[in-house]
Image: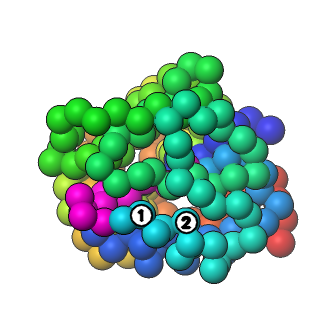
Amino acid sequence: MKYKAVVIGGSAGSLKAIIKILKEINNEIVIPIVILFHLSEDNENELPLLLSKYINNIIKEAEDKEQIQENVIYTAPAMYHLQIEDNLKFSLLYSEKVNYSRPSIDILFETAAEAFNGNLLGILLTGANTDGAKGLKRIEDLGGHVIVQEPSTAYSAIMPEGAIKILKNPEVISLEEIGKNLNELMGIRE
């Protein structure tokens, strides 16, 4: 299989979007999926518990120095940038905000692109700033596949529009098609 991981980023309106995607994807997808949303600083991350209602895979918050495992869906913790090291371990970093955000989608996407070296699928969803665009471009530049939510189907179109402006060949599809498309890219037929 070409892809060794999936990274998904989003902001305003992304919770509903990721729930829709998780309802659509097949439980046979075994590669790790890493989800990063912009979370408020006072937000205790209950995302894994909430998302576990919609898919049978293991869903957990990524931990510092944790080895990335197949068949697990990871979520980024609030207040820390989530990075993927070359040895495919997570690294949490508390530093300045990027694009007014911590965690930053760009940081996750850029480090994942380097770590998985072209064997990565990046998905950018709805959001109210341009975080994620540069990271998605890095994934594309290293030979990974990039999907951007069709802006007209986004709660906030700023994030997907920002990515479309700088990418060479993004796959721009509606939210309704992202889960089905993910299944097809993983070679899973309905």
- Amino acid type at circle 1 is Asn
Instruction: Specify start and end residues of the magenta stretch as a single range.
Output: 34-43
Q: Residues within 10 Å of mark 2 (few under 14, many from 20)?
A: some
Q: Residues within 10 Å of mark 1 (few under 14, many from 20)?
A: some
**Would you say residue 117 is visible in this rendering?**
no
- Amino acid type at circle 2 is Pro
Q: Which of 8 and 57 lies nearest the eye of the viewer? A: 57
Question: Residue placed farthest to the top in the image?
Answer: 86
Tell me if 61 is positioned left or right of 32 in this view. left
Q: Which of 39 and 179 lies nearest the eye of the viewer? A: 39
**Would you say residue 121 is visible in this rendering?**
yes
Residue 163 highlighted magenta (yes or no): no
Residue under numbered circle 1: 45
Tell me if 165 is positioned left or right of 110 in this view. left
Residue 48: which numbered mark, if any?
A: 2
Quadrant location of the N terminus in the rendered image: top right
Dot 1 and dot 2 residues touching (CB under 8 Å): yes
Vertical side of 99 occupied by 65: above or below = above
